[in-house]
Amino acid sequence: MKRLHLKGSIGLLIFSGFLFGAYGTGQHQILAADSSMTGFAQKAFGDADSNGDGVISRSEFDTGRTKTFTEKDSNGDGFMTLTEFKAGLPKFVQPRAESRFNEMDTNHDGKVSRSEHEASGDATFKRLDTNGDGRLTKEELPKFGNGKF
């Protein structure tokens, strides 16, 4: 059970925009607390790479985000509230959760629609895909260890 929870948490971090960076000041920020999280990024990458080809395609990325939104929208109303968004997130990202939620909530109505969530994913993917080839490689992912989130 514990292993499944960890895998689910990693998926939530990836597809909620946490693991692949944050926005905030406009500078690229990283969410790992410190470099002792060795292997965490590789594990997360492997989980997102559903076909095991060594890259995360746009399709894999979008599929994961869609799944995350559906899981987070626990009452099925088509919107994600802050409470729903924060549910299941690991403690080390909780301090950043409200800020990340507010970034996704572009119309500032206190909830994130599926379209707002998708737009956030577009921005995240474009920022990470530094060579513009439509695929994310391990080399394009943020480096862990600066403790910012």
Image: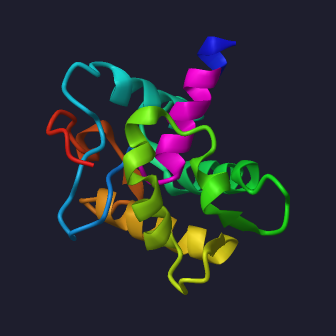
Rendered location of residue 48, percent (x, y): 52, 38
- Identify the magenta region: 5-18
Q: Position of residue 141 (x, y in %)?
A: 28, 44
The residue lying toward the viewer, choosing from 87 and 63, is 87
Asked whether, in this view, residue 93 is left or right of residue 25, the answer is right
Q: How many marks?
A: 0
**Residue 54 in view of the camera:** no
Characterize the magenta stretch by its predominant secondary structure.
helix
Compare residues 47 and 19 and report the one nearer the observer. Answer: 19
Comparing 75 with 20, the one in front is 75
For residue 44, what is the image quadrant?
A: top left
Tell me if residue 6 comes above or below residue 49 in the rendering: above
Q: Residue at x 27, y 19 (%)?
A: 38
Q: Is residue 141 visible?
A: yes
Outermost residue toward the right? 76
Q: What residue is at 58 percent from the left and 75 percent from the top? A: 116
Answer above or below: position of 147 versus 2.
Answer: below
Name the residue: 22% across, 35% down: 144
Residue at x 60%, y 75% (from the top left corner): 110
Relative to 52, residue 21 above or below: below
**Left of 84 or right of it: where is 94?**
left
Is residue 17 found inside the magenta-colored segment of the image? yes
Residue 127: percent from left, percent from top = 31, 64
